[in-house]
Image (cartoon, grey):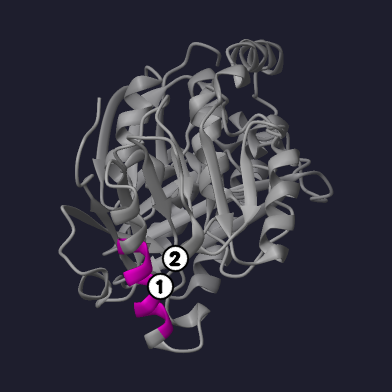
Amino acid sequence: MNSTQFSWIAASAFGLEGAISGELKRLGMSNVHSENGFVRFTGTLQDAWKANLSVRFSDRIFLLLKECDCYSFEDLYQNIYSIPWENYTSGKEAFNVTAQCARSKLMSVRDCQSVSKKALINRLKEYTKQEIFPETGFAFPVHIAIHTNHVRIMLNTSGPSLSRRGYRTWNGEAPLRETLAASLVEYSPWRPGMPLYDPCCGTATILIEAALRMGHIAPGLQRNFAMEQFSFFPRQDAYQLKTKIQEQSAPERIAFISGSDISDKAIELANKHINQANLQNRINVSVQSLQNVNLTEKNGVFICNPPYGERLNTKEQCHELYHDLSELQRRHPTWNMCAISSDTDFEKSYGRRADRKRKLYNGTIECYYYCYHALIRED
């Protein structure tokens, strides 16, 4: 299967489809096409392995086994049964079938899972002549996505979400997913070589994601993926590719990335995460109030995830903090300011409309990412 071309789906949070599409194209994937909630591409198993290691914005990489319309459980059964599962499994795996159903005739997740697993097992019985499947091996993650009666039958090659890079084992208050943090860096004016500062850095997720990008460090190098256990996974070639990607890392390039937070507990966790990401001495964080931040560098970018209403006692406190962000930019007129917030009064509290804003989701919370250009520019 090393040279066989497959259809793949990179799952996306709302608003990140364009970023995922762009990075898949940069990775050399073919036929990249974005849709609501995911991005399609074609490639080999090696390409999917490369994507799992390298993508910064996608939640998971799925192998698309079949796509069809189903209006009954019999339709679903027959389509699942038609897939040559004997080519993808040794029969020793634990078949873990998950499902999502929306706006369709088939709306029972449990029944969809049960019917799909029955069809899979019956197919294996027919084509392998094996009657008993003990399911004592590793998890074989099959995912059934049904939307408006359209079904995508997929194999989850990532396992746990790709946002779980491996460097964050402690969570502070209102943690920001790594994939969203990476997108805030991507959608900001910041580019490697420019100073970056997070004045509400929490446990340093934004700073770490920026540093990984600046150091050309693939975000998946510290974790494992479900596809490594697949019987058809080309291990030798894949691990050679991983070594090559590791060798392209250049942590010595990381500079001018720093941040602060008023919470000493958050900074303690931030330093732990920085160390676990092997970025110690590359990112500087300190306990400091936003009002006291004064930097000497010019032409930088502030990127932050300031508290929403859920993270401070009152809306008034939030609005005061947003005004303080405006004052921070006034003290640093050559700096851009970027902040994500679910508060619809953010711009009013900041004191002016954002030069650019983009709708994003922090988990299930609808937010906007506000970007303010530098007030002046010094060369």
Left or right placement of residue 56 versus residue 220 in this view: left
For the point 36% across and 39% down, the residue is 186
Q: Mark 1 or mark 2, which has the lower sequence index?
A: 2
Task: Judge whether 5 appears above or below 54 on screen.
Answer: above
Give the quarter of the image for residue 369: bottom left
The picture places residue 298, in percent across and down from the top left corner, at: 36, 35
Dot 1 and dot 2 residues touching (CB under 8 Å) = yes
Q: Which residue is mark 2?
A: 306
Query: How far, Cα to Cα, is label 1 from label 2?
Result: 8 Å
State the mark number for residue 321.
1
For the point 58% across and 66% down, the residue is 114
Task: Judge whether 23 appears above or below 147 on screen.
Answer: above
Q: Which residues are magenta?
A: 317-326
The kind of secondary structure the magenta stretch mainly shows is: helix
Quarter that holds the C terminus: top left
Give the quarter of the image for residue 306: bottom left
Q: State the residue in front, 163 or 65.
A: 163
Q: Nearer the viewer, mark 1 or mark 2?
A: 1
Q: State the residue in front, 45 or 165.
A: 165
Residue 83 among those drawn in magenta: no
Which kind of residue does numbered mark 2 sit on?
Pro
The picture places residue 71, in percent across and down from the top left corner, at: 31, 65
Which kind of residue does numbered mark 1 sit on?
Leu
Q: State the residue in front, 203 or 236.
A: 203
Left or right placement of residue 192 versus residue 167 in this view: left
The picture places residue 165, in percent across and down from the top left corner, at: 63, 42
Q: Residues within 10 Å of mark 1 (few under 14, many from 20)?
A: many
